[in-house]
Amino acid sequence: MSLKMVIDYPDNIPDALQETRSEFEKNAKLAMFVKLFEMKKISSGMAASILGMERVPFLLLLHQFNVAVVDLPDDELLDDVKNA
C-alpha cells in the first residue's frame, strides 16, 4: 500500500529557486528521504526504492546534500581500514 502526503508551499517558491514546479517537488522529495537516511531512520536501499532509483546512484548524490555515505566514528573507521 502506498500513501500520499500533501505539503502546502507558496506558489512563488519554485520561481525563487529557478525551478519548475515539478523540479521543486522532485527535489523536495529527494531532500526529505536524504534527510531520513542521514538521521538513520531509513536505509539507503529503502530511500532509493521510494525515490524510484537504484541504491548506488542514491549514494552517489548524497554529497550534493553534504551527507556522508559512511558515517562511522574515526576509531571505528580506522579499525575497519586496518582489518581490510
Image: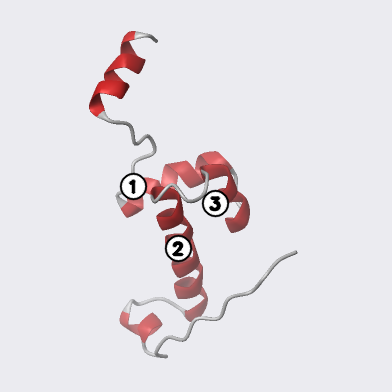
Tell me what residue is drawn at x 45 percent, y 55 percent.
Answer: 36
Disc 2, SS: helix
Q: CA distance from mark 3 to mark 2?
A: 9 Å
The three-letter code of the residue at mark 2 reads Met
Above or below, 76 against 72 in this view is: above
Tell me what residue is drawn at x 44 percent, y 69 percent.
Answer: 28
x then y, percent, for residue 70: 37, 34
Disc 1, SS: loop
The three-letter code of the residue at mark 3 reads Ala
Above or below, 58 against 21 in this view is: above
Tell me what residue is drawn at x 43 percent, y 47 percent.
Answer: 40
- Which sits in the foreground, 39 or 53? 39
The residue indicated by pointer 1 is 67
Is residue 52 visible to the viewer in this orientation of the structure?
no
Disc 3, SS: helix
Q: Earlier in the sequence, mark 1 or mark 3?
A: 3
Tell me what residue is drawn at x 51 percent, y 68 percent.
Answer: 26
User: What is the number of callouts on the image?
Assistant: 3
The residue indicated by pointer 3 is 47
- Quadrant for the N terminus, please: bottom right
Q: CA distance from mark 1 to mark 3?
A: 14 Å
Q: Earlier in the sequence, mark 3 or mark 2?
A: 2
The three-letter code of the residue at mark 1 reads Val
x then y, percent, for residue 73: 27, 30
x then y, percent, for residue 39: 39, 51
- Which sits in the foreground, 13 or 8? 8
For the residues bearing labels 3 and 2, Cβ distance under 8 angstroms? no
Q: CA distance from mark 2 to mark 1?
A: 12 Å
The residue indicated by pointer 2 is 32
